Amino acid sequence: MIKIVINTCFGGFGLSEEAEAEYKKRKGITDPDWYYWDIDRTCPVLVSMVEAGKVDGTYAELKVVEIPDDVNWFIHEYDGIEHVAERHRTWS
């Protein structure tokens, strides 16, 4: 199973200042131009932080969802609310 972090409320994905600092510390990030939207939503560090406790940003309610390994997935977002969807082929 793949664990993916999504936001479940209006506003959008985001980490609290404390959680962002902790993530950067755990990953050894020192780049001043780095921003939390650069985080891979399947990052084990992010997943463990969300599972362990409150890391939500001001307008975020983060949740870990699990999907089967063989799914070709993407995160669909509308007004900040996200869900994981399976990609399907289309032709035109």
Image (cartoon, rainbow, N blue to C red):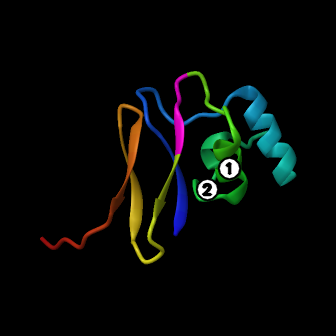
Judge by depth and name the residue closer to the eye, 30 or 69: 69
Question: Would you identify the image quadrant in which residue 49 lies?
Answer: top right
Percent x, y of residue 26 = 84, 49
Height in image: 73 above or below 75? below
Q: Does residue 77 lie above or below 28 as drawn?
A: above
Q: Name the residue located 12 percent from the left edge and 71 percent from the top edge.
A: 92
Mark 1 to mark 2 CA distance (whole Å): 8 Å
- Please tell me whether residue 71 belongs to the stretch shown in magenta: no
Q: Where is residue 90 in the image (x, y as percent from the top left)?
A: 19, 71
- Amino acid under label 2? Asp
Which span of residues is magenta-colored? 59-63
- Which residue is situated farthest in the top direction here? 58
Q: In this view, does 41 lie above or below 86?
A: above
Across and down, in percent, residue 68 comes to: 44, 71
Q: Mark 1 points at which residue?
A: 46
Whether residue 29 is visible: no
